[in-house]
Image (tube, rainbow, N blue to C red):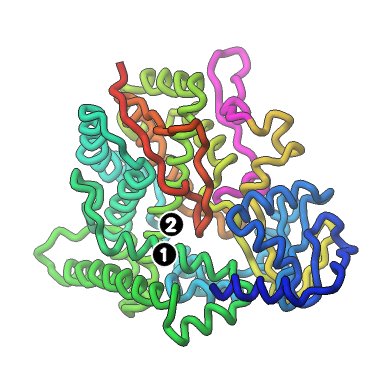
Amino acid sequence: MVDNLLLTLILLFIVFKPKPDSDQNSSPKSYPLIGSYITIYTNRHRLTQWTTDVVHNSPTLTFLLRRPFGQTRVITANPAVVQHILKTKFSNYQKGDMFRTTLFDLLGDGIFNIDGDEWKFQRQLCSHEFNTKSLRHFVEHVVDTELNERLVPILSTAAANNTVLDLQDILQRFAFDNICKIAFGHDPAYLTPSLPQAKFAVAFEDAVRIISQRFRTVTPLIWRIKRVLNIGSEQRLKEAVLEIREFAMNIMNEKKQELTDKSSIQSVDLLSRFLSSGHSDEKFVTDIVISFILAGRDTTSAALTWFFWLLSKNLAVESKIIEEIDEKSDSPVYDEVKEMVYTHASLCESMRLYPPVPVDSKFACDDDVLPDGTIVKKGMMVSYHPYAMGRVEKLWGGDWMEFRPERWLEKDEGTENVRFIARDSYTYPVFQAGPRICLGKDMAFLQMKRVVAGVLRQFKVVPVVDDGSEPVLVTALTSKMKDGFPVKIKVRE
């Protein structure tokens, strides 16, 4: 409502010509005081696609987006710039106060919302969870149990009854159970036949959506006023965060009790490591819990949702994946997923087109000049755009719009075997890059490949679409399908 009122006033009182952008002629039209707000507002329902179009029209794959009240944001799909901000000048491009303040109500001092020594400590402690032994346990016990005892029975029932499932919701539930088990030693049993509508899950969805909307307001002053007055979306955010923190607090208290009870079998998980390291402050630990739920629940489920949709449109790719699954079926679970080269390439290709985090941002601590000549002033937001980067012809060739896993593969000389060829992480920053590259990358791939093998070995996923339309991309902190992903499950002959 506030945004609509502001736009009406702007349209009524603007009687001057656009201010030219001499430094970036591909940038949207900019007006004094309001910047490019009219264009931003017009494209508010497709900001990811719109910024992709604009960045592609820039010769340097970088443009300046001028927001109201003098705010300027750099948006780039240039790998050299990505390397500059994520590695070369890492210390100059941080989360920053604005980013931290906007997300603080939900993420607090969790690893994804902090910089400096505090970030280094949390990252070092978390890194112990991602060794080979932990990854093998995760796949063979956590993921495999959730797959065989919960996901497959639900899919079997849906196939037998010819019912429609929201696969996006199912995969979020699956990922939520997995991250809680491996990170906290807690089983929320969210993926059960009744598909319970847990208060926590609803609260988490609302909180992520509202927090994301804060970044799109004309000025932070709007959501700050609403928060002070406790009205509208900010009132709901406050309620949702209370429910989320209550859930996280219960998990923490259960773990504390387990660690003090010498008669219990103590699990070795991420939460245990934090508590055993002497960090028993309730707010600090709950921040850790919430951050890992966000990372483990939303990213892999988003990647798999888009993957199954792309697979339904590319039956030749699906056939090759099934062939690979059959070839590896006699291998132990961990070895099976490690050796699924074509499936790995297919997942990378899917995330090229639909990265779980389509845009990510840093803030400049000091003035700087980017490799493409763009001038950055202290305090400016600099965003790199994985969604746009996956669609750049100069990076991926003229067939960039095709879902082609083969672009990630290369034949071994003298044999019929193929091997995976990774792109550098600055051309393909789906898992970030540099010092903050995602610690859970290997875990995510193992989980996704196990799900793909477990589902496609037995079932065919058939999207339910009435008019042949494609899913609508909606972006919060991660990319999702608007209104879910309705599918029918068919038993594979």
Q: List x then y, in percent, for residue 453.
A: 36, 29
Magenta segment range? Answer: 402-431
28 or 421, which lies in front?
28
Q: Secondary structure at mark 2?
A: helix
Residue 423 inside the magenta-drawn segment: yes
- Residue 156: quarter of image: top left
Q: Say if the magenta span includes residue 485.
A: no
Q: Is residue 285 visible?
A: no
Q: Which residue appears at 64% of the width and 42% of the height?
A: 390
Task: Determine which of the numbered discs, if any, sits on residue 65 in the image.
Answer: none
Which residue shows up at 43% across the image and 45% down it?
Answer: 444
Q: Residue 260, position in %: x, y?
A: 17, 72
Question: Could you say which disc has been placed on residue 291 in the image?
Answer: 1
Q: Which residue is nearer to you in this view: 198 or 31?
A: 31
User: Which quarter of the figure has residue 442?
Assistant: top left
Contact (CB < 8 A) between labels 2 and 1? yes
Q: Which of the labelled discs sits on residue 295, or is there none?
A: 2
Position of 391 with respect to 251 (left or right) is right
Q: In the image, is residue 317 above or below residue 215?
A: above
Residue under the point 55% across and 50% down: 431
Q: Amino acid at mark 1?
A: Ser
Query: Quadrant where the N terminus lies?
Result: bottom right
Outermost residue to the front: 12
- Residue ID at (27%, 45%): 142
Q: Residue furthest right?
A: 22
